[in-house]
Amino acid sequence: MNEKGLEAVALSIRSLSMDAIQKAKSGHPGLPLGAAELASVLYGEIMKHNPADSKWVDRDRFVLSAGHGSMLLYSILHLAGYKVSIDDIKNFRQVGSHCPGHPEYGYTDGVENTSGPLGQGVALAVGMAMAESMLEAKFNTPKHKIVDHYTYALVGEGCLQEGVSNEACSLAGNLQLEKLIVFYDENRISIDGSTDITFTDDIQKRYESYGWLVLRGSMYNMGEITGLVDMAKKAKKPTLIMLKSIIGKGAPKQGTPSVHGEPLGEADVAQAKKNLGLNPEEFFYASPDAYAYFEERRKALAKAEEDWKAEFEAWSKENPELRKAWDAAWAGEADGDAAEPTYKVGDSVATRAASGAMINYMAQKYSSLVGGSADLSGSNKTQFKCDNGTFSPSNRKGRTIEYGIREFGMASEAAGMQLHGGVRPFCATYLVFSDYMRSSIRLAAIMKIPTIYVLTHDSIYVGEDGPTHQPIEHLASLRAIPNVQVLRPGDAEETVEAWKCAMASKDHPVILALTRQNVPVYAKEDANWRANIAKGAYIVKKGSDKPDVTILATGSEVCMALEAAEKASGKSVRVVSVFDKNVFENQSDAVKEEIIGKDSRVIVAEAGVHFGWEGFAARADMFCIDRFGESGPAKAVAQELGFTADKLAELINR
């Protein structure tokens, strides 16, 4: 180990971080100053990576879960030779800089994930480790190891207090994810003071109870850190390495909340530089020894990838079928064939059941498809019938994932698997529990990754479980998240198309909102409906060229609208299935007029709040539910709430 070079790297991280944060007059200096040695030894000695190729598939992954300490990451990426320039660092937290306030996936070279909402980073890391172990089991052979890397994460007290980290780390222990190594920056300081005011957990005992190996050391002994990582790599379980540290190390107010979340101030920056042996008059200093260290180190890092490529080519020649599956998995393409589920008019099928059939169809077409449910697989209809069993410590080839009753962790782990690549994950629960997942769904949308969420039991027709389980505001809430596609198919045939849309997505998450109850497959007067559904809506029942009333209905309410149209007295009624409200809303006025009809009175029918439909219909013509439900049989609940075809017909006739 070149200790002199690594010490120069750590010093440079502190120098660059202080100046970048001070220039921006915004940021969090405490973590970069306090954890510089860890970043130095991790990127310098421990991790398998190649700055010349940040997308090398067998690289080790590093997740900065404590994303507020982003200058730690930007500084080490710059010094190591990634595409992060000194000018980017000088423009930290400014529009257009590749060094935004919190790390952003797809925006900065070498950044593996977007982080900032505390706790989600380590949950993403759990998903990455899950993906690695799946690919290792699927593709490695006795002769060739082409998947063999680790996932590292850095967490702070805030991450470990957030519930999502507990959900994810509990599952990681259960799954014995031995290639997951998490470093805990144990400085015992948060924004409001010492963590003792709220956080006195015995972290070691907690993580040992999860089934983790827990090791302890100092943040400032790089030789010790490498030794601890070596110990972690010998364990058959995930490892938490607790490193005692000093927040804001070197600053006059080190060890206090003052250095956590705001610039040090010019005077304290100058004093900190003196304390660290730096020139207070020199700004954005990086030691020549730090650059020289990585210039030499990059040769070995590049050779590691070249050696892997040779191994990969040998493996490819010996295993052409595996190579075909590999290429398809990383490209998100099909590598199999199957008969698509088909339905006929009059079939009575819950869209959750039709989704289950599509999951198994897609599983045969895409060997990369994996997923499961938050302890609701039977209810969500997410069981694989063609898989290799359940993913577990004894069966890494399993494609069914038992997430347990951990919805937030589940959503983040699925996103982590998607970020890792090589697998295509979905996760499932009831629509009402998307509340637990919303922050993770939002993060996936920001990262522009195509995670799939199967959300069943999508309305008051849940029935006897009552208002706690009957979603009301959820469709509107999820549609409000930018870059999230919310699909609510009206019957089994539309559910087939919904799954095709989900699998085709490359840059956004997709939500499938599905019924618990059976709904009939209805006749579709639009002969090209499968193509036109891409507009977000299509005509199910035309009525006439100039309908008096057009009902915009979603999901199970399409059937209700068709029934109500038959009961309308002397009016021409058009029924439109709004498959994707947001896509339909963004169509041109000409397209919307063609589908709705010119000068037609519009009624909206959806079993949820009216919020979001204001651009289509007058408030009095929104046949929606703006209150919580009731407990009772589904039809009785609908009757009690006045949400029936008869009531909709009355509105049409009004």
Image (spheres, helix red, strand yellow):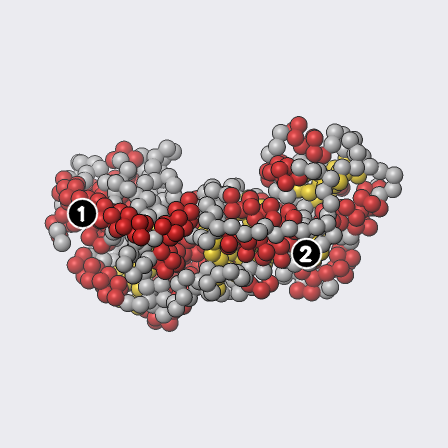
Q: Nearer the viewer, mark 2 or mark 1?
A: 2
Q: Which mark is residue 300?
A: 1
Q: Measured along the vertical axis of the image, is residue 125 above or below residue 267?
A: below
- The answer to whether 69 appears left or right of 292 in the picture is right
Query: Furthest-top residue in view?
Result: 590
Disc 2: which residue: 349
In the rendered structure, which disc, 2 or 1, sits on the residue that comes first in sequence? 1
- The answer to whether 379 appears left or right of 390 in the picture is right
Q: Callout 1, which amino acid?
A: Ala
Mark 2, secondary structure of its residue: strand
Quadrant containing the C terminus is: top right
Q: Residue at x 32, y 59 (%)?
A: 141
- x, y percent for residue 651: 81, 44
Q: Would residue 184 be seen by someone viewing this image from the given angle?
A: no
- The answer to whether 244 appears left or right of 177 in the picture is left
Query: Furthest-right residue in view?
Result: 570
Mark 1, secondary structure of its residue: helix
Quadrant containing the N terminus is: bottom left
Q: Would residue 479 be seen by someone viewing this image from the given angle?
A: yes
Q: Measured along the vertical axis of the image, is residue 206 above or below residue 566?
A: below
The CA span between labels 2 and 1 is 59 Å
Q: Residue at x 28, y 56 (%)?
A: 144
- x, y percent for residue 53: 28, 42
Q: Residue at x 23, y 58 (%)?
A: 219
Q: Callout 2, which amino acid?
A: Val
Q: Residue at x 73, y 49 (%)?
A: 345
> Could you say which is closer to the camera, residue 550 or residue 206?
550
- x, y percent for residue 66: 35, 52
